[in-house]
Each structure stands twice: as structure tokens, then as C-alpha cells.
Image (cartoon, grey):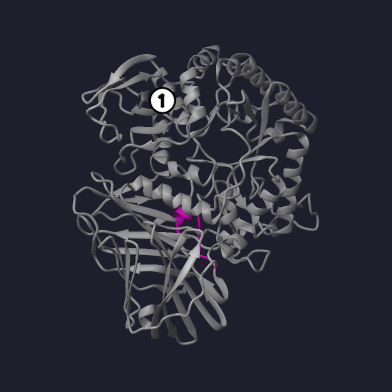
């Protein structure tokens, strides 16, 4: 069960139509719009799409720590090809191979005639055991002219959503940070793009380095597996992968007319390689206690919130398409409530047409008592199950990291997950998940030598215990792997202010596509207390267009009546709630600059286009609706409604929308 992902991945790409490998001094292969030119002197490869070079002189590298070897160091380089037929379709594999000492090197390029992307991976094998922690299937330092137009961008994707890290857009000519697992370059005007990313996330952490010294050109494109930095929360280099055969993850390289299509395609490929969990129902609506009540959660106020939803919100459209909401207990439930109370809470929720949610951190120890005995396995102390580097316990966010492969860690997880099911809970928020993926000196399971291997083993175990009985929602977690949970929080903690809304929307601007590998994204709890009504509308809107739709204010009897009035006023807008039920994550219309969010997002379903607009500034602005950039015919007129003001109007070429300071508007445009 632990390695179900690995067996899936190994089988996905082995459906090859066997043929004799054709050897030649050099080779040029065409498949559809793809053309590959391989050099048998250096092993370098050029990759063209539709007559245009997108990757020049790719010469892969591998090694241990800072001791690297390159295909250029090899002798007896050969180039060959064979047909293939796999889950992506029919195509051809072009293989560049060489010998370096005892090592045999093979780089495969997988070309498909009807796809606008290729795959590549690197394999090193030897009669003796290998130890590698660096594999770069893509290593090109030849300048390539990518775009003809100015105003080009490089996307940074963070490894996780901890510590309020942001996605970032860097202009060509400026130094871009190393992106994690995937990146894209695109032209702002034409939207044409290249997307590069790892589609396997079972063993390696992968970094994508893209450098551009001048407008329109990429000077360096390097995809190296075995990448760690402070943003992967690691304090040591990547773990060593051992064996007589060591393989990199598969890397996708795609050319797209629209960068948004490219990132969505990347997500689809990741999902095909590692299928997501089966669905457990509709997009959740609900409430989470960490929004306002926080450490004061108890049975009384939790039941009062549940009753408020039953009486005031569920009958007024704030519920999923089955009329259900999820009332979630966050951290400190185990301090403030005992087992009979927890069972009573879940039973009461069910009697009110609600689901019961709870919170758990499987890979962290917050008490930090090294000598404490692990209750679930008394033969171990906590110091036995921590992760270490050079004898120092790995710690982040104030918690010690636990080894996901240790039997005592697994016993702790088993106890909690079985309790949640026995108590009648339906939804579990799993937090601080990245602690389980830290690179460490060692793991209890000696076959686990990297953080990703450990994380996959831990997540597969959680998944096996949940057994399709619990909705698993990741909170602070790596973006990948994504096939062990139903949903994931798209950012870190977000509260009520416009600054919090803009931060959340930064993650939506460049991570909306993650709901194609999870079932839904999660914009965190919505808090209304302490800010303007405009900011309330904006925060609600940011959640409604992202995914999970959870409120967070204190709605118990002791909560502010003024805040409850706000909640009832805005969270019961039937048009907004209908939109939230119908739609998944909205796409950005345009990208922001630097770490700024986009300010306009859209979603098309049936004959409706929804457009959400935000004004992050303290000044009133008039926002022009560029119909062409929305894909609408500029010569047509479209009937539309603004859903917060309940105003009907006609959208035409010269249409502008007035946006008050720190506020939002939502348009529903009829396409027919």
C-alpha cells in the first residue's frame, strides 16, 4: 500500500511497442510538429517545435553533491529511436546513450505526434551500486530566441504554501529565483509560452532554473532533480538515491499558445501519471474554528456555531448542492474536548444535515519533550522518531519533525485516523505536512533515502487508513505529490483584510490549475471582523472563486452580533453561492507583476461566464473590461448582471466597471 504510487508510475510508461534500436552517427527525428536533432559527439540535443527551437544543445548532468559528470564526458555515444504507445498516445522514443567509466547513461525523449509537449528522463546504470543526489535531464546553456515581442515573464512556483511564500513573476533580463517542480515563460501580449516541469514526484525534489539576460531570449534552462533550498525548508542537501540503476523523474517540455493552457496541461499530465483520490462528494461549504475562536474551541461554542448554520445560513443558500455544510474543529480540540464530547459534536452535526470536521498534524511534535515515551509504542521515546541533521533535531514553525517511516510515528497516525472514523468525523484538515518531507540524515526505513520517498510513504499510509471514509484536506503542504488528498490550501493563513485577500489571490493567479490534480483548492477560512464591508465582499469573493468555501468568524452565542449580521448579509447571497457551487478555480485574465496578484479572474460554465474583479487600492477606480482578452467578440453585446449589487447591464466594447476602494465585483455574463 505504501508504494502504490510507485507501481503506478513504473507501469504508466512501459507500454512501449518494442523495436530494434536504430543506431547512427547522428539522427534527426520528426514526430508531428516536433523535431529533435541529436549529436553523437557531445550527446547534445536540440528540440524544435513547429520549426522553432525551444531547447538548444541539451547536455544532461548527474552526480553526487558537487561532483558532476556530463554527457559531454561520455564516449561511445549512440543515438537511436523506437516507436511507443503509452497513455499519452502514439509516438517515438529517441534515446541518446553513452559510457562514462563504469556508468552507462541513457536519456530518452518521448515525442508524440498529436501533443504539444514532449517528455524526457535520464537514467544512469552500473554493475556496481550508484549513489546520486543530482540528476539534470535538462541542462541547456545555449541562448535561444523564444519570443519576438517584448514584455516576457518567468514564473516562480513555490515548493509549499508555508510562511506566506508567494508565487512570483520575473521579467526577462532580470534574475529569476529557482522554481520548484514547474515553471513557465510567456509573452504578456500574445500569451504564447513554454512550460517545463517534473511530472513524477515519488523520489526527487526538482528545481527549474531559467536565466535570461536580454529580452526574448533564454540563456539557461536547467531542470535538476535533487534540488533543495531554504524554501523547501531543508537545511541539508538532497538525499542520496542508491542502486544499480538510478532514474530521474520524467520532465515535460511543452509549447503552448496560452500560458494558462500550458499550466493546465501540465496538471493534467501529472494527474494521468498519478491519478487523484476518488471523489467524496460536492465542493465543501462550511466553517473552521481557527478563523476567530482558535484556542478557545469547546463543545459549547462548537455546537452553537453548528446551530447558527442550521438556523441562519443553510436555509439561506450557504451550503453545497446537497444542502450540507462542514463544521470543522481546528487545533486545540484535543485540549478543550474529551472523547464523549467529540462524539456528541459529530452526532449533532449529522442530525443537522452537516458534516463534522477535525484537525491533525501527523508529522510534527509540538510538545518537544525528547525523553517522553511514545504512548502508542512505549518501547520508543520521542527522540527515537525525530528527523535529524548532524545530530540536531529538524525543526520548523516551532515543531519537531517526525520520521514518517518510523513504526511509532505510523502507530500514532493509525490511532488518530481510526479514532476520527470511529467518532463519526467526515473531514480532516491535515496541517504542517512538509515536516514529513525534510531531507534528513536517515530514516527508520533504510530503503527510504530522500524526503520525497519518506513523504510518499507517510501519505500512502494515511490514505490507506482513511479508506475513502474521510475527506483529506492538506493545509501547509508541498504542492506535490497530489494524489493522496482531496483538496489543498492554496496559500498560508489568511484573515480579513484586503492585504490577506490579495495574498490569497496571488496563489490563485498562478496556482489555479492545482485543482486539476486535487479535486479542489482551498482559500482558507473567511474572516469578516475588523474590516470594511468592501473588504468583506472581496474576501468572500476570493474564496468563492477558489474552491472550498469556509467561514471563520465566531458565530457562537458569545460572538459579535454585528459580525453575525455581516456574515448573514454577505454569505447568503444566492447568486454568489450558486456560482461557488457551480465553478472550480477561476483563471487569471492577465498576470500581475513581481509578487502582485492578478486583479481579474474568470470561469466559463455552460452559457455563463463569471468575471471577478478586485480593487486592492484605497482609491476608487474604473476598470475597463477588455472583451478580446476575455475571449469575447468585441463587436457583440452581452447581457450581464453584477452579483453583489444585483444590477443588470449590457456588456459592450466600451464597458467600464466602477470598483470602490478595497472592494470586489462579480459579473455574470450570458454568452448566448
Residue pointed to by mark 1:
538
Give the percent coordinates (x, y) of residue 285: 57, 28
Is residue 621 at all visible to an observer of this figure?
no
Give the percent coordinates (x, y) of residue 110: 43, 66
Give the percent coordinates (x, y) of residue 178: 38, 57
Is residue 572 at all visible to an observer of this figure?
yes
Residue 10 left/right relative to 42 = right
Q: In this figure, what is the number of numbered marks?
A: 1
Q: Residues within 10 Å of mark 1 (few under 14, many from 20)?
A: many
Q: Is 229 a magenta residue?
A: yes
Q: Which residues are magenta?
A: 228-239
Q: Is 210 a magenta residue?
A: no
Say which residue appears at 74% left-offset and 55% top-offset.
Answer: 408
Give the percent coordinates (x, y) of residue 558: 62, 16
**Quadrant housing the N terminus:** bottom right
State whether residue 93 is above or below residue 476. below
Residue 390 left/right relative to 421 = left
Say which residue appears at 34% left-offset and 50% top-offset.
Answer: 155
The kind of secondary structure the magenta stretch mainly shows is loop
Residue 640 placement: quadrant: top left
Is label 1 in a helix, a strand or a loop?
helix
State whether residue 451 is above or below residue 280. below
Residue 258 left/right relative to 404 = left
Residue 12 placement: quadrant: bottom right
Residue 48 left/right relative to 426 = left
**Quadrant housing the C terminus:** top left
Q: Nearer the viewer, residue 103 or 106?
A: 106
Amino acid at each position: 500500500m505504501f508504494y502504490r504510487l510507485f507501481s503506478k508510475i513504473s507501469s504508466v510508461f512501459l507500454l512501449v511497442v518494442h523495436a530494434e534500436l536504430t543506431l547512427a552517427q547522428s539522427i534527426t527525428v520528426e514526430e508531428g510538429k516536433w523535431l529533435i536533432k541529436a549529436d553523437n559527439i557531445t550527446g547534445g540535443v536540440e528540440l524544435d517545435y513547429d520549426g522553432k527551437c525551444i531547447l538548444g544543445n541539451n547536455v544532461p548532468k548527474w552526480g553526487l553533491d558537487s561532483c558532476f559528470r556530463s554527457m559531454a564526458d561520455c564516449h561511445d555515444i549512440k543515438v537511436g529511436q523506437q516507436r511507443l504507445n503509452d497513455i499519452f498516445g502514439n509516438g517515438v522514443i529517441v534515446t541518446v546513450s553513452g559510457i562514462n567509466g563504469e556508468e552507462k547513461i541513457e536519456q530518452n525523449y518521448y515525442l508524440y505526434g498529436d501533443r504539444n509537449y514532449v517528455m524526457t528522463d535520464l537514467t544512469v546504470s552500473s554493475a556496481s551500486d550508484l549513489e546520486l543526489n543530482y540528476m539534470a535531464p535538462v541542462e541547456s546553456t545555449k541562448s535561444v530566441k523564444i519570443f519576438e515581442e517584448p514584455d516576457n515573464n518567468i514564473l516562480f512556483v513555490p515548493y509549499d504554501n508555508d510562511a506566506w511564500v508567494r508565487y512570483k513573476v520575473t521579467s526577462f533580463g532580470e534574475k529569476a529565483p529557482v522554481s520548484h517542480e514547474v515553471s513557465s515563460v510567456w509573452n504578456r501580449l500574445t500569451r504564447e509560452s513554454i512550460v517545463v516541469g517534473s511530472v513524477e514526484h515519488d523520489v526527487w525534489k526538482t528545481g527549474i532554473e531559467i536565466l535570461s539576460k536580454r529580452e526574448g531570449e533564454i540563456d539557461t534552462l536547467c531542470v535538476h532533480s535533487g534540488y533543495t533550498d531554504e524554501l523547501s525548508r531543508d537545511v541539508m542537501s538532497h538525499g542520496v538515491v542508491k542502486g544499480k540503476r538510478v532514474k530521474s523523474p520524467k520532465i515535460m517540455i511543452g509549447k503552448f499558445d496560452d500560458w494558462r493552457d500550458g499550466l493546465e496541461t501540465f496538471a493534467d499530465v501529472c494527474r494521468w501519471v498519478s491519478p487523484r483520490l476518488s471523489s467524496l462528494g460536492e465542493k465543501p461549504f462550511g466553517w473552521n474554528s481557527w478563523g476567530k475562536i482558535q484556542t478557545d474551541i469547546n463543545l459549547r461554542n462548537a455546537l452553537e456555531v453548528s446551530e447558527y448554520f442550521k438556523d441562519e445560513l443553510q436555509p439561506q443558500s450557504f451550503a453545497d448542492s446537497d444542502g450540507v455544510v462542514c463544521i470543522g474543529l481546528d487545533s486545540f480540540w484535543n485540549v478543550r474536548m474529551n472523547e464523549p464530547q467529540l462524539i456528541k459534536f459529530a452526532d449533532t452535526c449529522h442530525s443537522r444535515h452537516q458534516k463534522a470536521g477535525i484537525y491533525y498534524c501527523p508529522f510534527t511534535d509540538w510538545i518537544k519533550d525528547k525523553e517522553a515515551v511514545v504512548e502508542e509504542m512505549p518501547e520508543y521515546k520521542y527522540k527515537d522518531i525525530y528527523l535529524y541533521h548532524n545530530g540536531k533535531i529538524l525543526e520548523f514553525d516551532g515543531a519537531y519533525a517526525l520520521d514518517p517511516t518510523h513504526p511509532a510515528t505510523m502507530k500514532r497516525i493509525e490511532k488518530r485516523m481510526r479514532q476520527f472514523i470511529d467518532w463519526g468525523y467526515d473531514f480532516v484538515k491535515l496541517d504542517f505536512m512538509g515536516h514529513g518531507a525534510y531531507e534528513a540524515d536517515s530514516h527508520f526505513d533504510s530503503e527510504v533515502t530522500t524526503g520525497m520517498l519518506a513523504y510518499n510513504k507517510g501519505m500512502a499510509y494515511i490514505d490507506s487508513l482513511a479508506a475513502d471514509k474521510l475527506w483529506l484536506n492538506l493545509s501547509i503542504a508541498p504542492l506535490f505529490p497530489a494524489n493522496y488528498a482531496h483538496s489543498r490550501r492554496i496559500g498560508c493563513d489568511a484573515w480579513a483584510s484586503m492585504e490577506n485577500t490579495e495574498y490569497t489571490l496571488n496563489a490563485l493567479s498562478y496556482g489555479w490549475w492545482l485543482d486539476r490534480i486535487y479535486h479542489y483548492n482551498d482559500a482558507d477560512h473567511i474572516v469578516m471582523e475588523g474590516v470594511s464591508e468592501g473588504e468583506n465582499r472581496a474576501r468572500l469573493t476570493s474564496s468563492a472563486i477558489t474552491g472550498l468555501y469556509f467561514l471563520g468568524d465566531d458565530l457562537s452565542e458569545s460572538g459579535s452580533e454585528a459580525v453575525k449580521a455581516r456574515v448573514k448579509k454577505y454569505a447568503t447571497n444566492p447568486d454568489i453561492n450558486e456560482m461557488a457551487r457551480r465553478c472550480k478555480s477561476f483563471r487569471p485574465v492577465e498576470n500581475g507583476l513581481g509578487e502582485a496578484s492578478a486583479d481579474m479572474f474568470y470561469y466559463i460554465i455552460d452559457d455563463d461566464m463569471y468575471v471577478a474583479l478586485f480593487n486592492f487600492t484605497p482609491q476608487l477606480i474604473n476598470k475597463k473590461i477588455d472583451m478580446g482578452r476575455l475571449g469575447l467578440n468585441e463587436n457583440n453585446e452581452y447581457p450581464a448582471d453584477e452579483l453583489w449589487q444585483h444590477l443588470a447591464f449590457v456588456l459592450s466594447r466600451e464597458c467600464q466597471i466602477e470598483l470602490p476602494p478595497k472592494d470586489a465585483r462579480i459579473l455574470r455574463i450570458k454568452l448566448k
